[in-house]
Amino acid sequence: MKIAIIYNKDRSGVINKFGMQNKEKYNPKTVRLVEEALEQGGHNVAIIDGNMDVIQQLQDFMPRVMEGERMGMVFNMAYGIQGESRYTHLPAMLEMLGIPYVGSTPSGHALALDKIITKIIMQKNGIPTPGFWVFSKADEDMSGVEYPVIVKPKMEAVSYGLRIVDNETDLRDAVKFTTEEFKQQALVEQFIRGREFCVGLLGNNPPEAFPIIEIDLEGNPDAIQSVEDKKKKPREKICPAPISQELADKMVQYTIRAFNALQLRDFSRVDIRMDENENIYLLEINSMASLGRTGAYVNAAAVAGYDYNALINRILDVAAVRYFAGTTLIDKTGEIKGLSQKLPLPVRIRTYISSRKETIEKTLKEMVNTNTYVRNVDGVNHLGSIIKRELSPLGFEHQVYPQIEVGNILLLDNCSDKKYDILLLCHVDNSTTLAKREFFKATEQRIYGTGVWENIGGLAVMIGALQALRFVRMLRKLNIGILLTTDDTLQGRISQNLVQNKTRTAQYILGLKGGGLEGTVISSRSGAAVYSCSMSMKEKGHAEDVSRAVNILSKIVSNWTGMTNEAKGLVVVPTEMNLQSNIMGHYANADILLSIRFGDIEQMQQIDKKIRGSITAKDRKIIRFQIEGGIRRPPMNRNEAVSSLYETIKKIGHKLDIRVLEDHRWSSADICFAGSGKPMIDGMGPLGTRVRGRDEYILRHSLLERSALLALTLLEIGMEKN
């Protein structure tokens, strides 16, 4: 299942800073632990920042159920950024978007976060809770307060702002601090001298209660847990608490009643004080119990038999059952069903790739920031050296095909007989000059930079996939070749024969160009033909000859574009036109660059004849016409072998909860030179696109997804021989 973990990282990701600012946040290390646990549970996981861009990030990552894909879920760890009822903000958006999520509803969070409402509901349901008063200002009448009392903000957690006072002067000072610092009412609650406990709940109808934890107050009945205690030096926790079974049962009974009365879901933690006469008082309920390893909830779960991974997957499980009424993923002992001590291969591969996210992105940045303009031979060769550096430790040797006009073509492989199970194809050059380069830039959901989608992202995916296969000790079982050309900008003019020769030795061919935003790979490509055409008046004549020459040119161009038939895969477009004419000077000349995309080689041969025969004998009396060029690359056609390989990749994607669709791309690529009948797929790189002519980007999460997809595809098709 696709799981998006959402937490609040970037507090500046808002339109305006307004209202109460949240002081509560998750440690990124804890978020990473949850990610690792879910990955080891077999899920496809992404971490998303819960700021104003969260909807776009979810659109990029989550499945499209209306298009037949399996439902994904959000593992909600977002405490909110600012404003009222901050726990409710993300669940409310998810309700609107139609995305299932772990945890309570907006209404449940709103009730539990407001300590005053919580206490009122407890009182109405016969659940014991300390007496209380509420103040909005420090100058209100406080004569009825019975001391000692504890003062706290009405809508905060983690013990923020707690003060114990025993006189009116200190009370007014505490209320003033709370209302000014937290911009909310002050809850003044009778302080219960005695012992402190926590009860963790997991599940629904009814929830499971973990063994009760006692917070070790070191025998001091007036002690409390401060925010400093919880964050810097947590107090010792005693579990199970040394109390009678009767008291334990009563605490659990009250806790479950409070959970139900507040309409909470999936998991929570209740804080309890017990006075010296063993009277029980529920203080508050945390609808988003902390999943930090040192927290009370995780400690109690461990005593209940859940290790950390099992606990996180069980929390997801109870939410999934609530939504889908499906089969649980966790058995009664807390073990993840279907997982032995040795995790399944896809899980190990995906977990390894995820753990190397920063390293993969660092390598990607280095490659993107290398100037690989086709004529910058040093830059192109430097990119090749980066790839050699990354693959040499994996057992890949390299062969250099020196070039003078462009950078050196590279062939890397891990087998001596040069007979490949799979040949990976990509190029290391691009057409962007240094003045127009876009350097590496990363946002929460996208990575920008020249070549990042076109080819360099695919190189990073390849490196990540091969490193993962070595990690699981499967790389040596595969014979893999990697051909990196340096003349894609020249449409393979130099490398054509080499590509043809090397693809003949491979069982499968995979191209590393970027995939489409909708999760597409490329099962067919158009062929490419390019013509350079020049026209000039034959000799200086009359003014009307200028008009006639321009008219002839216009008719020729019109005839060319009129041959376009998209249904038959044919598009004819002048990509550059430079016309200069002058009636007084009696001249007219033009240069035209004509680009053609076609799907059938025989059809293109007929088009070639028509283009070269565009000038009639009558026209030649007026103009001189010269045409050069022709077919640059043949088409890559979808055939039975391609279809079978696509279905294999699609099935692997389904297992990984990765969307895989097929697409035709009008542009040509090196893979078009591979012999017909070969099983080949292009577009195995990360998902992205090019916008505004030259800017391009990839979806950040797809860098890891496509690495896992490529690794398992290599394994699946490469192991067929065995």
Image (tube, rainbow, N blue to C red):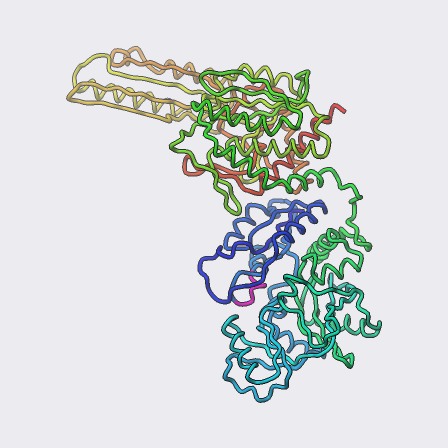
Answer above or below: position of 228 versus 400. Answer: below
Answer above or below: position of 631 versus 95. Answer: above
Q: Position of residue 130 (x, y in %)?
A: 68, 80
Give the tally of numbered discs.
Answer: 0
Residue lying at 61% horizontally and 52% vertically, measured from the top left: 28
Residue lying at 63% horizontally and 44% vertically, measured from the top left: 68
Residue lying at 58% horizontally and 43% vertically, measured from the top left: 701
Q: Position of residue 243 (x, y in %)?
A: 82, 72
**In the visual, does 450 lie left or right of 69?**
left
The quadrant in which the C terminus is found is top right
* Residue 401 visible in the picture: yes
Q: Position of residue 345 (x, y in %)?
A: 73, 37
- Residue 224 position by quadrant: bottom right
Predominant secondary structure in magenta? Answer: helix
In depth, the one of 271 and 593 nearer the eye is 271
Looking at the rendering, the stretch of residues picked out in magenta corresponds to 84-89
* Residue 327 visible in the picture: no
Residue sitting farthest toward the bottom:
143
Find out whether residue 87 is within the magenta segment: yes
Residue sitting farthest toward the right:
245
Answer above or below: position of 689 versus 428. Answer: below
Find out whether residue 473 is within the magenta segment: no
In depth, the one of 165 and 431 nearer the eye is 165
**In the visual, does 611 lie left or right of 457?**
left
Answer above or below: position of 528 versus 252. Answer: above
Q: Position of residue 92 (x, y in %)?
A: 57, 61
In depth, the one of 534 and 250 nearer the eye is 250
- Residue 85 position by quadrant: bottom right
